[in-house]
Amino acid sequence: MPAAPPTADVFLTPQALLDHWQGHRRLTRRVIEAFPDDKFTGYSVGGMRPFGVMAQELIGMAVPTVRGMLTGEWKDAGGAAHPKQETLRLWDESTKELNALWPKIPTARFAETLNAFGQWKMRGSELILYLVDNEIHHRGQGYVYLRSLGIEPPAFWER
């Protein structure tokens, strides 16, 4: 059995990765809050999807990915967009689930190559970073929408 790598080689602990991701999630939640109710699921710019649809995508990926890392079962949790208040409720619920499931993921899973949802073959750590990148991308689209509506979005550095 090979020896575990020394802890000095660890750049980011699983808890630090979750803390980083949850910082982004707090900011994205504030972007959701900033949308007028009537623009959340129906407003679009330049052919992009409404932000409510993007937010539902983020919700539908977060817990199922973490659960997949934990169990090896990859169940898609997509779905239609919800009104803003329901989206915020689902966001908060998924945040609690992430916090509960995360510590149960064996640390070795972050280094294993996984085949998430039968389409993303990458290490567990890369998969989580993909989710963070995807969230940042969609949040940026939300910033464009808010600015086009004359609404100042939350400061991106306040996570």
Image: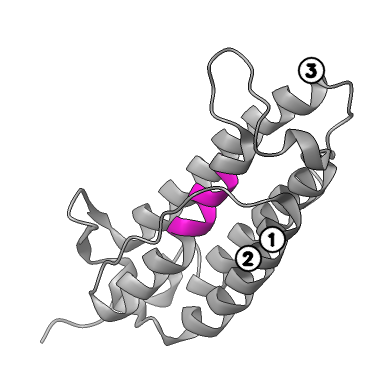
For marks 3 and 1, the one nearer the N-term is: 1
On the image, the x and y values in percent for residue 89 come to 70, 66
135 or 88, nearer to the observer: 88
Q: Is residue 130 above or below residue 69?
A: above
On the image, the x and y values in percent for residue 115 come to 19, 58
Horizontal placement of 95 versus 105: left or right?
A: right
User: Which amino acid type corresponds to the residue marked 2 in the rendered image?
Assistant: Leu
Q: Find disc 2 in the rendering and name its residue.
A: 90
94 or 113, nearer to the observer: 94
The answer to the question of whether label 2 and label 3 lie on touching residues, with beta carbons closer than 8 A, is no
Q: Which mark is residue 34?
A: none
Magenta stretch in the rendered image: 54-61
Compute the Cα span from label 2 to label 3.
26 Å
The mark tally for this picture is 3
User: Which amino acid type corresponds to the residue marked 3 in the rendered image?
Assistant: Ser
Q: Main secondary structure of the magenta part?
A: helix
Quadrant of the drawing holding the N terminus: bottom left
Image quadrant of residue 46? top right
Residue at 63% across, 73% down = 93
| 136 in magenta | no
Q: Secondary structure at mark 2?
A: helix
Q: Find disc 3 in the rendering and name its residue.
A: 148
Q: Find disc 1 in the rendering and name its residue.
A: 86
Q: Is residue 147 above or below residue 78?
A: above
On the image, the x and y values in percent for residue 72 come to 23, 75
The answer to the question of whether label 1 and label 2 lie on touching residues, with beta carbons closer than 8 A, is yes
